[in-house]
Image (tube, rainbow, N blue to C red):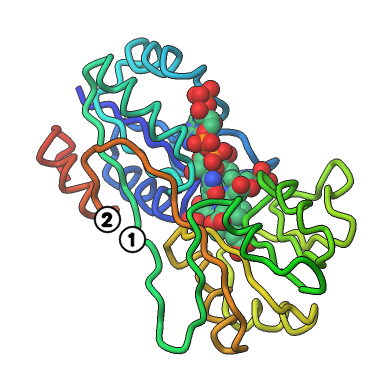
């Protein structure tokens, strides 16, 4: 009997959840519990970590999971690493649903950096007005360039004071659109955009808005994850599951 664990948190995961629900598949959707009100899903949903590799391996065995689809964000490298190790340990099939990274369109002014530290180094010492659209996990790293103004975009209102002396937060969850991001950046007189190369349509708007405004973008490359089978669309995952399992899809 096929039973699927879908590690979510992305637009592609939500698309796959709808296809699985439509096919009447036995599946569980999983969120980390990073946001206060995650989008509801059409599948039974669990929220919170598993407790590292051992916790995930135990979950797979206890819940009789036969297939794991890792549809987490490309920067959720810890979850992806754990999924590779736990599925190997529990003997459970694993596939990653991953969207390609963004490629530079003509007229864009992108500086690619390896990681957050690279993005901090690439910024001016002071006087810049930076759209820091990378969420909240790494904001404190930019205190090294505290002489700049930072516009943050967060999913939930910050509980603590922002860790940057000259910063403002807008509260919004994507997907975002070019017109909205262009207006936001013009309103705040933004001079630089910092973004993760998450790929997908839901966060690309700021890059297209930056190109339209002739603004430089500092783009952070995604972290390395261990080798695993990777597919690039929810439909391809459904076909894989269909071949792999008795989904009847
Ligand atoms: C909790 C689930 C869906 C999924 C929607 C996608 C699109 C909108 C764009 C910007 C960039 C950022 C951030 C972003 C986007 C989608 C997708 C995507 C970027 C939710 C969600 C959860 C999270 C976690 C959150 C992180 C943060 C990152 C904001 C739900 C809305 C910046 C990534 O406050 C926090 O702690 C937020 C943490 C991880 C990165 C960070 O380091 O802070 N995502 N985002 C998931 C969980 O608990 O398991 O609340 O509904 C999902 C989505 N966020 O179903 O349609 O597919 O990428 N998410 C980045 O790309 O840089 C915003 O502002 O321009
Ligand atoms: P991460 O750093 O890779 O994972 C840290 C820990 O969070 C994992 O070891 C696991 O805890 C738990 N976790 C992560 N994703 C989970 C999931 N889907 N279900 C259950 N537990 C999960 O992850 P992250 O970067 O904080 O991302 C957390 C969530 O936000 C993921 O669902 C991801 O898809 C989504 N997201 C992240 C980004 C981003 O920029 N990082 C962007 C958009 C969406 P245990 O070790 O205890 O199992």
Classify 64 as above or below 20: above
Q: Which numbered tag is attached to residue 57?
A: none
Left/right placement of residue 243 relative to residue 45 reads left
- Residue 46 visible? The answer is no
Task: Where is residue 216? Give x, y as percent.
Answer: 59, 78
Graded by Cα atoms within 10 Å as few (under 14), some (14 to 19) or many (20 or more), the crowding at tag 1 reads few
Classify 145 as above or below 37: below
Task: Where is residue 185? Give x, y as percent.
Answer: 71, 79
- Residue 63 visible? The answer is yes
For the image, the number of numbered tags is: 2
Classify 55 as above or below 139: above
Quadrant of res 145: bottom right
Question: Which quadrant, please, contains the C terminus?
Answer: top left
Q: Residue at x 25, y 32 (%)?
A: 94
Residue at the extreme left of the image, as rendered: 243
Q: Which numbered tag is attached to residue 232?
A: 2
Q: Residue at x 60, y 50 (%)?
A: 117
Task: Tell me if label 2 and label 1 are in contact, CB under 8 Å.
Answer: yes
Left/right placement of residue 222 relative to residue 238 reads right
Question: Which of 43 and 238 lies nearest the eye of the viewer?
Answer: 238
Q: Which residue is mark 1?
A: 100
Q: Nearer the viewer, mark 2 or mark 1?
A: 1
**Which mark is first along the chain, 1 or 2?**
1
């Amino acid at each position: 009997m096929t039973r699927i664990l879908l590690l979510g948190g992305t637009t592609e995961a939500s698309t796959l959840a709808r296809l699985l629900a439509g096919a009447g598949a036995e599946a569980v959707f999983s969120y980390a519990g990073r946001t206060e009100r995650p989008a509801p899903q059409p599948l039974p949903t669990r929220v919170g970590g598993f407790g590292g590799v051992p916790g995930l391996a135990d979950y797979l065995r206890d819940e009789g999971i036969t297939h794991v689809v890792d549809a987490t964000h490309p920067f959720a490298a810890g979850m992806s690493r754990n999924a590779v190790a736990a599925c190997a340990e529990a003997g459970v099939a694993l596939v990653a649903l991953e969207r390609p990274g963004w490629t530079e369109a003509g007229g864009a002014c992108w500086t690619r950096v390896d990681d957050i530290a690279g993005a901090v180094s690439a910024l001016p010492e002071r006087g810049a007005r930076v759209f820091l659209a990378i969420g909240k996990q790494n904001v404190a790293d930019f205190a090294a360039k505290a002489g700049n103004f930072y516009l943050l975009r967060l999913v939930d209102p910050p509980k603590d004071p922002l860790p940057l002396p000259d910063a403002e937060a807008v509260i919004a969850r994507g997907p975002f659109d070019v017109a909205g991001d262009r207006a936001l950046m013009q309103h705040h007189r933004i001079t630089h955009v910092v973004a993760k190369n998450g790929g997908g349509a839901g966060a690309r708007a700021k890059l297209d808005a930056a190109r339209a405004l002739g603004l430089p973008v500092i783009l952070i490359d995604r972290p390395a994850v261990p080798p695993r089978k990777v597919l690039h669309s929810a439909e391809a995952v459904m076909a894989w599951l269909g071949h792999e399992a008795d989904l009847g899809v």
